[in-house]
Amino acid sequence: MPTADPETERPHRPLSYLDAFAPLIALTVLVSSAVALFGLDAMNGPLQVAMMLSAMITSIIILKNGHSWSEVESAGKKGVSSVVSAIFILLAIGALIGTWNMAGTIPTLVYYGLALIDPSWFYVASLFACALISLGIGSSWTTVGTIGVGLMGLATLAGVSPVITAGAVVSGAYTGDKLSPLSETTILAAQLSDNNIYVHLRHQAWVSIPAFAIAAVGLTMLGLADRSPGVGDAMINSELMALDQIFWITPLNLLPLVLLIFLSVRKAPASLAIMSSALFAGLLACLLQPQAVLAAFPEATGGFIDSVKSVWQVIAGGYHSETGIKPVDDLLSRGGMSSMLLTIWLIIVALAFGSLLDEFGFLTKLVTPVLTRARRTGSLVATSVGTAVGLNVITADQYVAVVLPLRLFRVEFEKRGLASTNLSRAASDGGIVTAPLVPWNSCGAYMSAVLGVPTLAYLPYAIFNYVSPLLDVLYGYTNFRIERIPPAAAPTGTAPAE
């Protein structure tokens, strides 16, 4: 029986399949139109408008079915509130990039990297570096916002492809995130499936390690086959000289990175850890790079107040360089909280849209018929992975993409005698690692903003992120590493989850 809204006494009509599909059709048409009309510049506003219009169309359908506007507002607020922590992280990362540039942290990483890394092995080296850092701190976002930014600057100065480098950075960061016992998304997947975290990780490793190996081979081949002319030794020497003239290159410049890693390992909240490192970098810049601090504030004449103004301005608007060497200026002229505002706009409207679909039953209406048609183990795993991937696209939130499949499919896995580790792995492979491949997903928007490469451009090179779900589906159809529970432990006569 339809329920009644106490505010309007209007009955709530159930969703029809046309109602459920309409927002997805609108999303597809509007997003594809934005990309077709504006290309990779769609992230600079048109994509945000497309998501906003999709949310409005969804709201009209909800109102048509008897719900009140206050219910729509409440659901939208819930979606936006869920992304507050991500907004603070984004703003902190913007501040960190600015002050790390001014303090010489990123220039020092790039300076040493130019001297040490062979361009032929650059992509695979980036993959391993990001995987190790992310494994240690348990955060793909922090890894990309720190080491990833340095590697992108290094790629530009060394004359290798920044686009392929971005794919390698994302692959490595998500490998470590997915296999780290410190990762909040990994812990979430284990907890919601009632698995010990290390049991969950061992089961994950059967997919993640082969996927990482495939990514390493692919990126190695890309590096060896790279026919780009590079920039030559003379250009690299001029870039090194420019960095050496602007900054005092010393290992002391890496102290903000050490502090960030320490705070991350100690499980300090990500936004606080990043902002603490950003502020420390600003203080360090005043001590070690006074010329860079004064250059950031043209009106400065020296003194404590001018130093405070410079750091403050860099946190807000980023650091800017005018050496006359374009690659060096592109590397250094970045950051600031203001640089993240377009990304925050996209995340807010995308999460509001996704929240409406989740709160008013659109997703359950679409997923339940697919679940009932998944007769074999392979098709059930494929449905679980596919649902998680689809939720990343539709709801723009990796947490929903992980949590909802665990909630919808858990009873069905148990009915068929399949251990919950299979479901937690499917939810992780579909929900966690594919999130940065969707431009309007909070993860994809973040990676694009921080790395300076459009999501769709780096997607083909984020090999780990699309090989993982494909391997999981393959395991399901071949019954390779599919764990089962004894028949006595499997419940009988239980209906599929709704």
Image: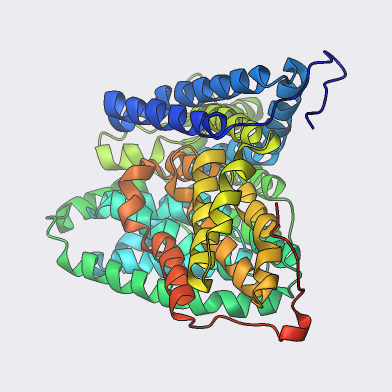
Number of callouts: 0
Farthest residue to the top: give it.
8
Please indicate whether residue 438 sits to the left or right of residue 194 in the image. left
- Quadrant in the rendering for residue 266: bottom right
Question: What colour scheme has been applied to the protein in the rendered image?
Answer: rainbow
Residue 315 shows up from this direction: no
Q: Residue at x 59, y 61 (%)?
A: 427
Residue 256 shows up from this direction: yes
- Quadrant in the rendering for residue 455: top left
Q: Position of residue 209 (x, y in %)?
A: 47, 77
Q: Which quarter of the image is occupied by the N terminus? A: top right
Q: Residue at x 68, y 50 (%)?
A: 270
Of residues 319 and 122, the one drawn nearer to the viewer in this rendering: 122
- Looking at the image, is 150 positioned above or below residue 191? above
- Looking at the image, is 72 positioned above or below residue 311? above
Of residues 493 and 186, the one drawn nearer to the viewer in this rendering: 493
Q: Position of residue 371 (x, y in %)?
A: 57, 57
Of residues 242 and 416, the one drawn nearer to the viewer in this rendering: 416
Farthest residue to the right: give it.
6
- Looking at the image, is 482 positioned above or below residue 462? below
Please indicate whether residue 275 sits to the left or right of residue 230 in the image. right
Q: Residue at x 61, y 25 (%)?
A: 309
- Quadrant in the rendering for residue 315: top right
Q: Position of residue 190 (x, y in %)?
A: 70, 67
